[in-house]
Image: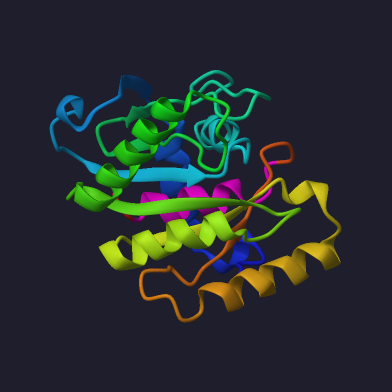
Amino acid sequence: MKRNSVDELSNEAIEQGRVLFGGPCDFMLGVVSMATLPPEGPTEIAFAGRSNVGKSTLLNALTNRKNLARASSTPGRTQEINFFDLGGALRLVDLPGFGYARAARKDAKRWAGLTRDYLKGRPTLRRVCLLVDARHGLKDIDREVMDLLDKSAVNYQVILTKADKVKPSALEAITAEVAAGIARRPAAHPEIVATSSETGDGIAMLRAELAALS
């Protein structure tokens, strides 16, 4: 199911999302091992997706900042787990992109292992936003990640990115395809949010969804 408009959310929910994501948001640290994870604290929302799907750009759009998270046209740039503190109410977690192996094999394996360990063993992780490029839909690597999350009982929500790059009819078709792909998955959140960091479409809705988890 895809929310079609802000009108389907209450004004209160939209305002709560606007206030929360419009407040202080600071980079905490980047970690390369489970031993250096920050102490457990507020609810954590992680952002996962194929390399170059737009994770950093979406984080910047959500927080209305240009450089909170570094965006790059080079796939695989995010090589550690980056934590951001959202006013003490939420932590946003930028995970390394998956499905790109330009890095040395041993490094890629280490990053992948760290991400899996975090996803499976972080009690404060409330939801994973699984970003999917609206131009391409679900790929096998996305399904592998969903398998892991299902087995680990970690709630996840598919967020379509770059929705402005496709025609409305194509977006509707890809949304329906994704909805069918997650329908029987036990850990999948049923709502699919289509977003565009360029136009702002879907950003208010996603803020409201995530603010409700704080």
Q: How many marks?
A: 0
Say if the magenta span includes residue 115. Answer: no
Q: Residue at x 61, y 64 (%)?
A: 7
Residue 214 appears left or right of 141: left
Residue 56 appears left or right of 146: right
The image shows residue 128 at horizontal and vertical percentages of: 39, 52
Residue 74 appears left or right of 43: right
Residue 38 appears left or right of 84: left
Q: Residue at x 26, y 43 (%)?
A: 118
Q: Residue at x 51, y 62 (%)?
A: 143
Magenta stretch, overall SS: helix
Q: Residue furthest front?
A: 105
Determine whether 59 is above or below 210 in the image: above
Q: Which residues are magenta?
A: 200-212
Determine whether 11 is above or below 84 in the image: below
The image shows residue 187 at horizontal and vertical percentages of: 36, 69
Say if the magenta span includes residue 210. Answer: yes
Q: Nearer the viewer, residue 200 or 32?
A: 32
